[in-house]
């Protein structure tokens, strides 16, 4: 049997996650790679008429580029997620009242969670972006179910007011995607692909 040639990327460059999200930090940790996390300095306000996918892509790139300017020798990962309800962006609710409003709007509806990923290395001129769209069908939730869920999990820092990796899975009828961690906030299949392209060895 022939051995496959070893085409593994190798680099000594530092890997940095341009995010303070504990969810993305936990996901990236699954790869067993050493990395640091740096907070990006980005205004996340949507532009007038900006579509959810465009907003997510713009913010992912802006986060990666901002951190890359401060750490030009490193490979930077930036990501952003926006819930898309019929073309209307739904971000992190921030408060209980806004979370109730979001879940009431989404019950019985199909919501597309647009998760953008950007990888940038300023020293090498590397910059690539990819999108992972996850279609989620919400159950026709009662007000009581919404209230009980929010009190139990308090997902106020999650786009769309739900944590699918926790109790939020009980809110859903179906999930359709091709990158299992995308809904949580960092599509690891795409992350592996892009950081390998940037020269980071994973295996």
Image (cartoon, helix red, strand yellow):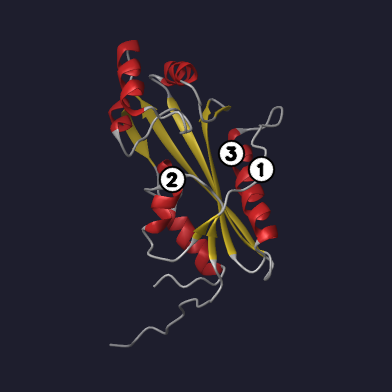
Question: Which of the image's four quarters has the C terminus?
Answer: bottom left
Q: Position of residue 4 (x, y in %)?
A: 38, 83
Find disc 1 in the rendering and name its residue. Answer: 42
Q: Residues within 10 Å of mark 2 (few under 14, many from 20)?
A: few
Q: CA distance from mark 1 to mark 3?
A: 17 Å
**In this image, 64 relative to 27: left or right?**
right
Seen at 47% across and 16% down, the residue is 97
Kindly identify which numbered label has been placed on residue 155: none
In the image, residue 77 lies at what x, y percent? Answer: 55, 56
Identify the residue shown where x is 56% and y is 53%: 38
Residue found 33% across the figure and 30% down from its top: 168
Secondary element at tag 2: helix
User: Dot 3: what SS?
Assistant: helix
Horizontal arrangement in the rendering, residue 182 relative to residue 52 (left or right): left
CA–CA distance in space, label 3 to label 2? 22 Å
Are discs 1 and 2 less than 8 Å apart at CB? Answer: no
- Characterize the local packing of mark 3: few (<14), some (14-19) or many (20 or more) Cα atoms within 10 angstroms: many
- Which residue matches tag 2? 22
Q: Label 1: few (<14), some or many (≥20) within 10 Å?
A: some
Quarter of the figure with residue 107? top left
Q: Upstream in the sequence, badge 3 or badge 2?
A: 2
Along the polypeptide, which appears first: circle 1 or circle 2?
A: 2
Pick out the residue farthest to the bottom. 2
Name the residue tied to disc 3: 53
């Amino acid at each position: 049997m022939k051995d496959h040639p070893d085409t593994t990327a190798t680099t000594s460059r530092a890997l940095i996650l341009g995010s303070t999200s504990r969810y993305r930090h936990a996901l990236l940790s699954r790869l067993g790679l050493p990395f640091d996390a740096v907070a990006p300095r980005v205004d996340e306000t949507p532009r007038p008429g900006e579509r959810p996918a465009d907003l997510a892509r713009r913010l992912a790139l802006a986060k990666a580029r901002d951190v890359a300017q401060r750490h030009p020798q490193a490979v930077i990962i930036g990501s952003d997620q926006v819930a898309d309800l019929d073309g209307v962006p739904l971000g992190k609710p921030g408060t209980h009242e806004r979370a109730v409003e979001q879940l009431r709007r989404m019950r019985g509806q199909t919501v597309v969670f647009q998760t953008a990923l950007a990888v940038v290395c300023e020293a090498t001129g590397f910059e690539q972006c990819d999108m992972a769209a996850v279609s989620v069908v919400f159950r026709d939730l009662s007000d009581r179910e919404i209230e009980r869920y929010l009190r139990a999990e308090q997902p106020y820092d999650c786009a769309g007011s739900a944590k699918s990796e926790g109790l939020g899975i009980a809110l859903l009828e179906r999930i359709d995607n091709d990158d299992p961690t995308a809904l949580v906030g960092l599509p690891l299949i795409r992350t592996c692909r892009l950081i390998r392209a940037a020269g980071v060895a994973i295996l």
